[in-house]
Image (tube, rainbow, N blue to C red):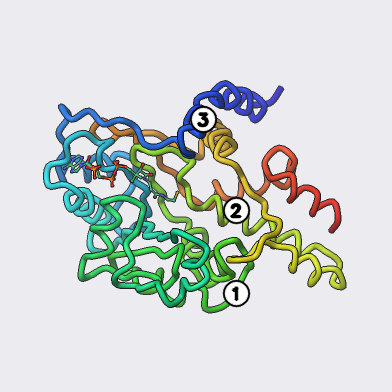
């Protein structure tokens, strides 16, 4: 039995905890912080440097502020700690995703979306980050990214302007021209602070690739009909959904393969990785065993391609 199988088994054991969380409202949330542990800007930078993150790097983070303990200086101290770790030649990015409350709003999302005013639901650190005057934010109503540093403008430019790929978040979210593709192409340093791989937005980049690689392989005369069956922003259909339980399986596999590493910032666990080999490994796993990783509808759709 290979290490992938043992990771799947380990994740099965964890599944009940995930299911308990799911019943309580969806994702595993964040780790509880220990307020007796104090974290400073210097401490954040030191914890990040201990991972190998260094001057000139580009880094993206998903975060829970409270998981770190008591952060002296709050969200700004964490942001400054990241900026210190990569230095003036480095670029820091945060997910500044936004959502809608009801279908009516979803249909009008382009009218409602404001690059300067729409808040992110990704936490206080990204919300504070995007409001900094030096931050660039990509222009996408659901999957925007904000960044600070010399590559920030390039990273966030023209989100969804070309290289479109149909997805449940519209055809621009994970387009060729998107920060998410650039994270992959640039093989950025990717961090999770006090949250696990269930929060890894790149899972949707993986799903998008699974669908679009399938379309690329399909017979040309079938491609349009198959594309029409893919779920869109307001249209129902198939999608290669990788469930939150499977994301924990993936986390364990990445750890076993030496692609995912662990450190800490204050009381929070810090997960970190280079994103390109993680995405490549995930696509390979899912293409090898789509019935395990993806939704039933996607597997049926695959059978028809
Ligand atoms: C949702 C989520 C952000 C909640 O984490 P959190 O730690 O409770 O919230 P935030 O990071 O927004 O930080 C605010 C909390 O930090 C705490 N806080 C405030 N100042 C603080 C400080 N100086 N030191 C430590 N904690 C502090 C407060 O409790 C505050 O919660 P409150 O608003 O309920 O009072 C987290 O679970 C998560 O999912 N993060 C990843 C989000 C993401 O990137 N998603 C991608 C797509 S799924």
Residue 206's disc number? 2
Which quadrant of the view contains residue 230? bottom right
**Is residue 227 shown above or below 80?**
below
Quarter that holds the C terminus:
bottom right
Which structural element holds mark 2?
helix
User: Which is nearer the N-term, disc 1 or disc 3?
Assistant: 3
Q: Circle 1 sits in a helix, a strand or a loop, which is it?
A: loop
| x then y, percent, for residue 189 | 41, 51
For image coordinates 36% across by 50% down, the residue present is 61
Q: CA distance from mark 2 to mark 3?
A: 21 Å
Q: Earlier in the sequence, mark 2 or mark 3?
A: 3
Q: Which mark is residue 77?
A: none
Q: Residues within 10 Å of mark 3 (few under 14, many from 20)?
A: some
* Residue placed most toward the observer, 294 or 150: 294
Vertical position of residue 225 compared to residue 200: above or below:
below
Residue, disc 1: 163
Q: Which mark is residue 18?
A: 3
Quadrant of residue 19 in the image? top right
Front of the two marks 1 and 3: 3
The residues tagged by marks 1 and 3 sit, at their Cα atoms, a distance apart of 36 Å
> Label 3's element?
helix
């Amino acid at each position: 039995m290979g290490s992938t199988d043992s990771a799947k088994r380990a994740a099965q054991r964890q599944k009940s905890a995930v299911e308990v969380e799911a019943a309580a409202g969806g994702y595993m949330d964040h780790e509880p912080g220990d307020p007796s542990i104090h974290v400073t800007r210097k401490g954040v930078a030191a914890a990040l440097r201990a991972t190998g993150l260094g001057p000139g790097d580009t880094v993206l983070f998903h975060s829970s502020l409270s998981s770190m303990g008591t952060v002296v200086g709050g969200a700004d101290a964490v942001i400054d700690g990241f900026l210190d770790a990569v230095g003036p030649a480095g670029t820091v990015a945060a997910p500044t995703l936004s959502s809608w409350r009801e279908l009516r709003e979803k249909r009008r999302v382009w009218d409602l979306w404001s690059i300067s005013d729409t808040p992110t639901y990704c936490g206080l650190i990204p919300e504070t980050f995007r409001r900094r005057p030096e931050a660039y934010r990509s222009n996408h109503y659901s999957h925007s990214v904000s960044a600070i540093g010399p590559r920030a403008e390039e990273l966030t430019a023209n989100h969804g302007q070309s290289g479109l790929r149909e997805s449940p978040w519209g055809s621009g979210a994970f387009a060729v021209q998107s920060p998410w593709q650039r994270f992959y192409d640039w093989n950025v340093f990717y961090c999770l602070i006090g949250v696990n791989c269930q929060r890894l937005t790149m899972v949707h980049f993986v799903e998008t690739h699974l669908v679009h690689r399938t379309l690329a392989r399909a017979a040309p005369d079938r491609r349009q009909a198959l594309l029409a069956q893919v779920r869109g922003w307001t249209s129902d259909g198939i999608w290669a959904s990788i469930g939150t339980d499977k994301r924990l399986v993936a986390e364990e596999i990445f750890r076993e393969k030496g692609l995912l590493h662990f450190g800490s910032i204050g009381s929070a666990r810090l997960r970190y990785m280079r994103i390109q080999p993680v995405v490549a490994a995930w696509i390979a796993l899912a293409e090898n065993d789509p019935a395990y990783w993806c939704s039933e509808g996607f597997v049926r759709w695959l059978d028809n391609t």
